[in-house]
Amino acid sequence: MKKIAITGSIGAGKSHIVKLLNEQHGIPVFNCDKEARKLQEEDPYTKNAIIQWLGHSVYDFGEVDVKAMGEALFGNDANLKRMEALIAGPIMANFHKFCYEHQYRMKDKVPFVLYENAILMNNKSYATFDGVIVVDADTDIRLERVMTNRGVSEEYFNSRNNKQRSVMYIRAMLENKRVPDFVIKNNGGDLDLKELIDFCTY
């Protein structure tokens, strides 16, 4: 069973590709954003560390205040790196458990699992995957998606977008570590996933 990571800039449409692979092809998905939120809300060590560091304002009745957390992290590079370092280890440990379950305990076997992570390239874990899917879309399309679907400002989009690596840079990093990659352009409309499936399975 292969381990395939999927990444891409804000608004590129990673979640749409992931949804198609999951619903149409039965591919299991490990979503890092959801796992991070789960750690931040349910893991006592992680939660206490965040409160001591950022204060109670990033929580709302025990749940993450998305806006407050976003402002604390994406407006401060040092805070963002510290959060990544805090949760990176536990997330990868949970991903390995996820892979073990699907490879050895599930009745229905799958050719690969997906690891969805927008900041995959921020640490060296990308080198451990059998392949990486990079989802791309034109900047104006990504901006429109984010403003429409998430209701955020252009300023917020630009602040996030400026911190993310370009497709060309990601591919160069992957090539340096000899990790196969597949770029899929997601500007809208119907997508033919045959080549993508072939990449993930061969």
Image (cartoon, rainbow, N blue to C red):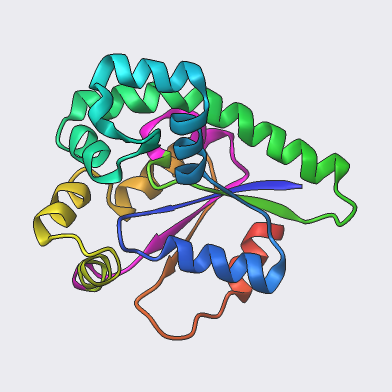
Q: Looking at the picture, how far across and down is residue 31, in whole percent?
A: 53, 48
Q: Is residue 202 visible?
A: no
Q: Looking at the picture, how far across and down is residue 119, in whole percent?
A: 38, 41
Extreme residue toward the bottom, this view: 189
Q: Residue at x 21, y 48 (%)?
A: 160
In the displayed structure, does residue 131 sit left or right of residue 50? right
Q: Is 157 placed above or below 184 here?
A: above
Q: Is 156 placed above or below 13 here?
A: above
Q: Looking at the picture, how far across and down is residue 29, in whole percent?
A: 61, 53
In the displayed structure, does residue 173 sit left or right of residue 21? left
Q: Is residue 89 visible?
A: yes
Extreme residue toward the left, this view: 155
Quarter of the image for residue 64 reads top left
The answer to if 130 sits in the magenta stretch is yes
**Quarter containing the C terminus:** bottom right
The answer to if 182 sits in the magenta stretch is no
Extreme residue toward the front, this view: 61
Q: Is 100 placed above or below 28 here?
A: above
Quarter of the image for residue 77 reads top left
**Residue nearest the viewer, comparing 10 with 46:** 46
In the displayed structure, does residue 83 sit left or right of residue 67? right
**Residue nearest the viewer, comparing 100 with 67:** 67
Q: Is 165 placed above or below 97 here?
A: below
**Residue nearest the viewer, comparing 94 with 202:** 94
The region drawn magenta spans: 121-140
In the displayed structure, does residue 54 sit left or right of residue 3? left
Q: Looking at the picture, how far across and down is residue 111, in whole percent?
A: 76, 56
Q: Residue at x 46, y 36 (%)?
A: 36
